[in-house]
Image (cartoon, rainbow, N blue to C red):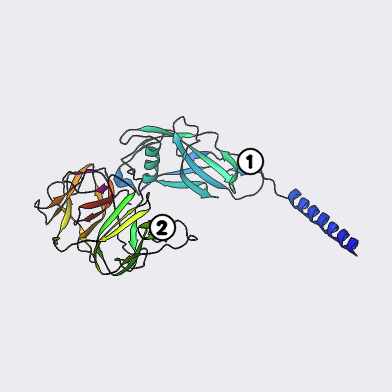
Amino acid sequence: MKNIYKILIAFIGVLAISCNADAVDNRLIIDAVSAPEITAPATGKVFVFEEEQGSDVAAKFTWSAAEYSNAVVVNYTLLIDKKGGDFAKALTLATTTQVTEASVLVKNLNQAAIDLGGPTGVASEFDVKIASSVSGGVPQLSKTLITISVTPYAGRVVYDFTDWYLVGDATVSGWDNNKGNQILFRSGTNSNEYTFTGFFKAGAFKTISSLGSWTPMYGGSDGSLAYRGKDSDPDPASFVIPVSGYYTFKMDVQKLTYELVAYNASAAKIYDTVGIIGDSTPGSWDSSTPMVKSTFNEHIWSLGVTALNDGGLKFRANDSWDVSWGGKTPFSGGGTGDNIPVEKSKYVVYFNDLDGSYLMIPNQE
């Protein structure tokens, strides 16, 4: 009987191998036949951009359909590289599926030109090609290219920082992770250090860096930070506020440490208005651009998306120079009377009048 079972199992094994071999033999083989080629715009096209045109269409790029040995779904990628480049580090302007055209916005072509080394305000030449693929394989790259000239305006400011926000029933947003969450102020000299001095309700809180998401996250206990990088990671302990009042919370994401101490705000002055002023601001040095006071924390101010120019700015209270604040470092810092350096962009601005901390996040749409 055992021998009969052995023979049966062997027969089934041979049959399975035979079926797998048949499946491999019947697998569809796809070969590249001819690469797509750009048909418009014509080579030599000149683009001179202005910031106000950012949301306009710079050009509609069209190309011929790629051909493969079988009827397949074709993906296209519109690529741009500096003139004479080998496209090994080309940037992507657009992607489509089964569509042989793409409208590229001014701001996207403008930024690509800058990222490829094109100086702002100066004409530079770039090569453009079209690539095709099938399910990520069987790539084809156009054999010819077009060369265009782009004069970009000042593009995105380099901002290689991570911002962190408060979330929890001790904070303004409660446990909603995308409801006007209070941002932490970052040190101007150490990008790993974050701080917030202000009012907390009795309760608990954590910090998150991506609004609308629960990861990445920091919690902790006994002065040690606990990091949660993905949803499957353990949920860290919350920071606890025992009694409603003012506190200073500091965390160092490199050392994985934190401090939470009571802050005496009894002598802190309450200001009617705080605004930004300087040659980078809409009112230059003549008038302040008013900020909005938090209804939860009367020492915290913010300014929605605002276009700023190259130059400097300060914060001042009550449209007067009696009380003003500044800093030496772009984006974040505080504690000095210097003009804060600003590079042209659109910013969201935050300010704390208790300690002069500021945070300016560029590249807002």
- Decide which of tag 1 and tag 2 comes sooner along the chain: 1
Q: Is residue 239 magenta?
A: no
Q: For the magenta stretch, what is the residue range?
A: 326-344
As helix, strand or loop, the secondary structure at mark 1 comes to strand
Amino acid type, mark 2: Ala
Q: Residue at x 22, y 59 (%)?
A: 300
Q: Hey, which quadrant is residue 196 in on the image?
A: bottom left
Amino acid type, mark 1: Ala
Residue, disc 2: 226
Q: Residue at x 76, y 53 (%)?
A: 20
Residue, disc 1: 32
Q: Residue furthest top?
A: 84
Q: Is residue 141 left or right of residue 341?
A: right
Q: Visible in this render: residue 46? A: yes
Q: Visible in this render: residue 64? A: no
Give residue 25's position: percent from left, percent from top. 76, 48
Nearest the eye: 25 or 109:
25
Q: Is residue 332 magenta?
A: yes
Nearest the eye: 310 or 53:
310
